[in-house]
Image: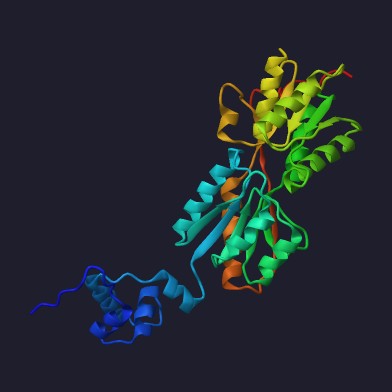
Amino acid sequence: MAERRSVDKRVTSHEVALRAGVSQSTVSRALAGDPRLSEATRLRVLEIARSLGYKPNAIARSLITKRTNIVGLVASNMANPFYPLVLEAFTQHLHSLGWRVLLFTAGSREDVDDLLPEVLAYQVDGLIIVSAAMSSRMARECVGRGTPVVLFNRYVPDSGASAVSCDNRGGGRKVAEALLRAGYRRLAYIAGREDASTSVDRERGFGEALLEHGVKTWLREPGNFSYEAGFNAAMRLLRLDEPPEAIFCANDITAIGAIDAARKLKVRVPEDLAVIGFDDIPAASWAAYNLTTVRQPIERMIEASVRLLLGRIEDPSLAAVNEFIPGELVRRGSARLDVAPKEG
């Protein structure tokens, strides 16, 4: 009489091993693609597992291998359109390499340091921190627990975590030099979050280049990488008795807010005011904004981040590395950068 199996009963690796005439460890090695196993044995085990409908238990396998094959992505500031694009690209890249992704997002008022203990409880093999600042203490704690960490477009000095970032300082320099070559002199910067290395470095590079070319003063407004902050900051700047001729914004969404503020005040862009952003989000190329900006090399940054993370997962003794990849100044219609320098 043919054997009848309850639909609720899962096929086990023990049954596969009995049918194939091998040990359970051999079944595990065959499913993992162990190259030390003979091809004939591997194929026989795989065929029997398929015929029996065997599906490996990922949790049980992780207990044996000490790996979950999962990378945690931790993100905040999801209102910035740059980062959903980044998260999608990270997910696709990791999936193409056979890794799975768990996404954790911090609320607008939630500290990433408070979120990380919950993330670590999922036993992810590694962490990529996107669009969020973390303390050096928490970075060291992650590393101390054996969970490799890579910071994306952020870095925390002396933390033990690797970091991959656009060369934000170099990008700020490119903006300043392009504006000065075009003859702009009354300049302003609308910042991002004060604790974000991205905004700090963009401003630092911008200011260094200005000083090197003899421009000792410029205007500055605080911000937080948001449309509202860009709009309100630009309104304050453009209502001054001597408003700026050009505004460099910490990111594109801030710059879009600045352009809309200029429109509200009947200030023409670029005839009366140049506006430059940073990131090159899709909206930057829209005809309504036609924003000059610094394009972040997302694909190269993601490839470098994953390479560093997987390298440290395989060899925890590898030293932390900081990589800075140059961005590209993309010239569009929100700034006249190809005109002859002005007199004076």
In which quadrant of the rendered image does the C terminus lie?
top right
Residue that protrudes farthest toward the top in the picture: 266
Question: Is residue 236 in view?
Answer: yes
Residue 224, by quadrant, is top right
Residue 324: percent from left, percent from top: 70, 52
Q: Is residue 340 above or below residue 203?
A: above
Front residue of this view, candidates 66 and 344:
66
Looking at the image, which residue is at 55% across and 33% down? 282
Looking at the image, which residue is at 26% across and 87% down? 21
Looking at the image, which residue is at 75% across and 48% down? 197
Residue 31, by quadrant, is bottom left
In which quadrant of the rendered image does the N terminus lie?
bottom left
Residue 325: percent from left, percent from top: 67, 50
Residue 155, by quadrant, is bottom right
State how many labels appear.
0
Residue that protrudes farthest toward the left in the picture: 1
Front residue of this view, candidates 101 and 271:
101
Question: Is residue 276 in view?
Answer: no
Left or right? Give the position of 132 relative to 44: right
Q: Is residue 51 above or below residue 332?
A: below
Residue 79: percent from left, percent from top: 60, 38
